[in-house]
Amino acid sequence: MTFKQNQLTVTNSNDTIPGRIPHVYYEYRKNYLIWVEKQNDYLRMNEPAWFMFEHYNMGKSEDEIISLFIKHYPNYKIKSASDIKNFFRTLHEIEKKENCENQHINQVELSIDTKYFIRRIYRIGKKQVMFAYQDDMVEEIIHPLFRSHEMHYDGIYKHSVTVGFTNNHYFIRYSGKDYEIYGKDETHQLKGKLFMFMANFTHNKKEHDWMMTCHAAAVTKNNKTLLIPAGSGSGKTTLAALLQSQGYSVISDDFVPICFDGMAHYFPAALSVKSGAVNVLKSYYPDLITTPYLYLSTEKLVKYIERGSMSDEDLVPRQVHKVLFINYDPKVPCKFQKLSRFDGIFEILEHSYIVPNARNPLAFFQWSTKIQYYALTYSDPEKMIEKINSLMEDDK
């Protein structure tokens, strides 16, 4: 169905709408974005589906909803009875589904001797933080990313982080507080938590001060900022490094914290260059040729482009103007397209962590419907850079 444009509509409160499926929603041109509180998940619906969802949430039976639907949409033709059954089945599953997200908080004090842990001091801006790593293997998860910020200082530290591995679990402890526990296969979650700590430490914030974090690169030039969300191995770092060589400033190549006003904030980690990208970047960064590889796993070799000391200019938050999704394809020199806002919003959700409370999804809905979204598939770096330069110069 085609609907005429209408004004934006949002829920009037930061509280979740109660019912069978507690939620927060955002309407844009008769399409609905819905955050389901219980599962911390997101749904997308058009107006007819929203009508049924709304009445289902109020507790009406399927027969009542269908009867109301026919009265409200007398000219709407339902494709088949099975479509309606499948829709209600989906709602039943959502209603019954429990949130499987493990918060990883263990209130039990662990008895761990940290006397022989490896200690590293990082200076971020004008502050220092001490990281204590249990051994070389644990250290290699984080230390190479912040090596350029390392300093030697024997004073007392206000902030400290202890990271180790015991009983098939990783653990983190912040400045003597309770331990957080992660499974041996959860290094990604472990790094995410430590990255959040470093973002908070760098910008004097707490987790609830952020709207979201995005698995993305972000670059800025001439007061315009481009967010580049993508999965691992998609070329985020390669693209960020290439753009940096062309005069762009890199906010981050992998982890971008964003506040409620849509501002992206600098993240001080080094750029992680995978082995397949070294040949592309070595002419721009000759030191990569002699920089040794680090073995993150048997399948993953990485070299790092260090970023040096952080400046006051780096700490300036940057308003995200456009979002670009990238994909490397050796068969495609350069293919560029503009995406619909709703397609872009659901694509960015795939690469983001939004703090699960009613305030944050609502803020995300409001911000994300004002952004322009694009997709770029490429294999030719020069054509890719040319297209991005053109995109950043276009004010439309």
Image (cartoon, rainbow, N blue to C red):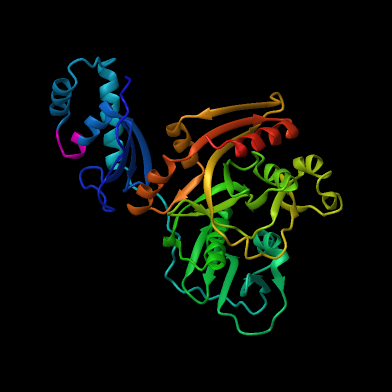
Residue 374, located in which quarter of the rendered image? top right
Q: Image point 44% across, 33% down: which residue?
A: 341
Q: Image point 68% across, 59% down: which residue?
A: 145
Residue 387 versus residue 193 in the image, above or below:
above
x then y, percent, for residue 182:
52, 59
x then y, percent, for residue 177:
47, 74
Q: Image point 45% across, 36% down: which residue?
A: 346
The residue closer to the viewer here, 139 or 323, is 323
> Does the magenta-highlighted stretch encompass residue 373?
no
Residue 283 versus residue 290 in the image, above or below:
above
Q: Quadrant of the N terminus?
A: top left
The residue closer to the viewer here, 365 or 248, is 248
Q: Does residue 110 appear anywhere in the picture?
A: yes
In the shown orientation, is residue 344 left or right of residue 280? left
x then y, percent, for residue 78:
26, 16
In the shown orientation, is residue 100 left or right of residue 235? left
> Does the magenta-highlighted stretch encompass residue 58?
yes
* View extreme (bottom): residue: 155
Tag count in the figure?
A: 0
x then y, percent, for residue 302:
74, 50
In the shown orientation, is residue 309 left or right of residue 94? right
Residue 74 versus residue 27 in the image, above or below:
above
Q: Does residue 357 appear anywhere in the picture?
A: no
Q: Image point 64% across, 69% down: which residue?
A: 134
**Magenta span:** 55-60
